[in-house]
Image (cartoon, rainbow, N blue to C red):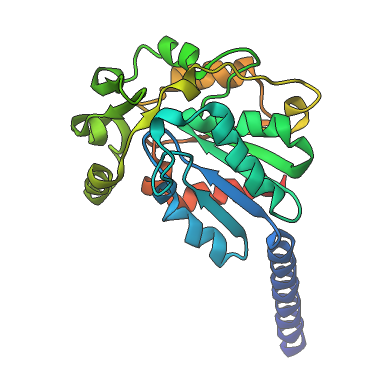
């Protein structure tokens, strides 16, 4: 009986050691991943303030940037073009050794698509987070106009002088953050800014030879009232992805469920 107990204990310790070894190896394999996180309309790099430290704690490199004219980037909003925004991403990609994983949220799925056309050999994967996944020759605006059940449009103010829009604070909670802490809504009242109109009206120029060979993944937010599940499903059906994940969240899972979102990023990174 004693010998059997000792044997069982030894086997348990061996199994535990193997599990720990495999877990350590898995962590080591993920240490070199580089994520570039791109915010959506009216937002900036602060979107990712809960996600970035989680990824960095696991040994990954993270670049959360402000697109031109957004956040701390002081480019005059009226001068911003799609090409300018994509160029900023490409310059960052070129400065990084090895391949990167691009994550695009909301409207700025268009940015990661166009960047993939220009730098297909430098991009390991594309992750669209409730994002606009638009085919060649089409615009983000064309698909946004089809999303008739979204709640934001009546609250979007257009500013002709700067060719930009802003979003009224009255819709922040319902439209963007209904499952987030109230503190996020209060932060947004201070941090949300103008959004350039022209980027969403510029047709994408994509080819199968470049954009088409970069692996695509989609994370659908099933309670999204800004980019509704209807239009998300239409887009990832028309432009198929290797895998579609679903999160039961609002438009902002980086605030409401950052741990779950990071876990999805890592699962995609391992594929």
Nearer-the-camera pick, 54 or 40: 40
Number of marks drawn: 0
Q: Position of residue 121 (x, y in %)?
A: 79, 40
What residue is drawn where x is 29% and y is 29%?
Answer: 166
Q: Position of residue 78 (x, y in %)?
A: 40, 28
**Residue 153 occupies quadrant:** top left
Quadrant of image for the C terminus:
top right
Nearer-the-camera pick, 202 or 127: 202
Quadrant of image for the N terminus:
bottom right
Nearer-the-camera pick, 11 or 101: 101
What residue is drawn where x is 77% and y is 87%?
Answer: 3
Nearer-the-camera pick, 81 or 223: 81
Question: Is residue 210 toward the left or the right of residue 34 in the image?
Answer: right
Q: Position of residue 21 (x, y in %)?
A: 74, 72
Residue sitting at the far left: 170
What residue is drawn where x is 66% and y is 22%?
Answer: 240
Question: Is residue 260 toward the left or the right of residue 17 in the image?
Answer: left
Residue 240 vertical placement versus 28 (above, below): above
Q: Position of residue 259 (x, y in %)?
A: 47, 54
């Amino acid at each position: 009986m004693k010998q059997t107990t000792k044997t069982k204990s030894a086997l348990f310790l061996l199994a535990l050691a193997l599990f720990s070894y495999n877990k350590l190896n898995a962590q080591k394999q993920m240490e070199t991943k580089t994520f570039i996180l791109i915010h959506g309309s009216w937002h900036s790099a602060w979107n990712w303030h809960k996600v970035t430290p989680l990824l960095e704690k696991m040994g990954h490199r993270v670049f959360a940037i402000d697109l031109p004219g957004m956040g701390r980037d002081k480019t005059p909003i009226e001068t911003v073009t799609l090409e300018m925004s994509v160029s900023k991403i490409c310059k960052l990609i070129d400065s990084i050794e090895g391949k990167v994983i691009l994550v695009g949220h909301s409207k700025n799925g268009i940015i990661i698509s166009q960047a993939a056309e220009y730098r297909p050999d430098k991009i390991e994967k594309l992750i669209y987070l409730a994002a606009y996944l638009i085919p060649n020759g089409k615009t983000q605006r064309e698909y946004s106009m089809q999303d008739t059940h979204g709640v934001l449009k009546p609250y979007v103010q257009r500013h002709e002088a700067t060719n930009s829009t802003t979003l009224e604070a009255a819709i922040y909670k319902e439209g963007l953050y209904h499952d987030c802490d109230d503190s996020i809504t209060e932060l947004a009242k201070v941090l949300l800014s103008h959004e350039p109109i022209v980027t969403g009206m510029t047709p994408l120029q994509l080819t199968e030879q470049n954009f088409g060979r970069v692996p695509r993944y989609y994370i659908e937010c099933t309670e999204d009232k800004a980019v509704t599940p209807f239009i998300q499903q239409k887009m990832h059906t028309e432009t198929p992805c290797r895998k579609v994940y679903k999160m039961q969240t609002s438009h902002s899972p980086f605030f409401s469920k950052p741990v779950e979102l990071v876990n999805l990023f890592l699962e995609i990174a391992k594929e």
